[in-house]
Amino acid sequence: MICTAQLFSSRDVCKTACRNSPTGINTGAGARLSHLSGFTIVEVVIAVLISTIVFATVICAYVGANDRAEWSAYSLAAQSLAMQGIEQARAAQWDPESWPVIDKLPVTNYTRVEKLDVLVSGTPVLATNYVSISTIATSPQIRQLRADCVWVLVSRYHGAAGPFTNTAVTFRASDQ
């Protein structure tokens, strides 16, 4: 059967000129296709719900990525601060073979409070660097240098703010 189309006026937009169409819709001449002309309210609500879920997921992913990036920046700064404590201890003179013995690297513990080297517009984040020097062996003489940098991420909610610890450990012989 051939389907013929007619030009419709703006008043008759929802009317059809096809009878017994191949889609199986049987409409009478000039009958309204209101059930085919648009979306039902249920379909619109489901579409809005799906869109809301998609946008909420994107926003949550963005906030999570931002939080992780901020934590990574502070962790890198804390690791740098721990390595700075190690390097300061490694730079101390220690020559037990000379006369008189030079030992500016005694077995000790000390702390320093410094701010993390991260660009912030508000209050800077302070970190405590705990440096400990201990003797590992006496022949050959080896000392362990350990730095623990403890910091808190104040921008997070209370349960996930920390404290976090970055640790650096190395060994030093007397001839280094």
Image (tube, grey):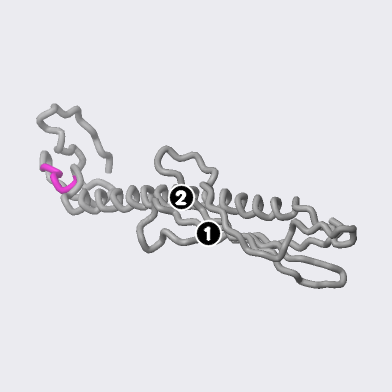
* Residue beneath the point at 65% across and 53% down: 85
Instruction: Tell me where residue 165 appears, x and y as whole percent.
Output: 54, 61
| Residue stretch in magenta | 32-36
- Which residue is identified by label 1? 150
Which is closer to the viewer, label 1 or label 2?
1
Q: Is 6 in front, or is 138?
A: 138
Question: Any magenta on residue 33?
Answer: yes
Where disc 2 sits, the SS reads helix
Q: Report whether 174 appears left or right of 77.
A: right
Q: CA distance from mark 1 to mark 2?
A: 23 Å
Q: Is residue 6 above or below residue 136?
A: above
- Which residue is identified by label 2? 65
* Residue beneath the point at 83% across and 72% down: 138
Q: Report whether 8 appears left or right of 162.
A: left
Amino acid at dot 1: Val
Q: Earlier in the sequence, mark 1 or mark 2?
A: 2
Question: Any magenta on residue 86?
Answer: no
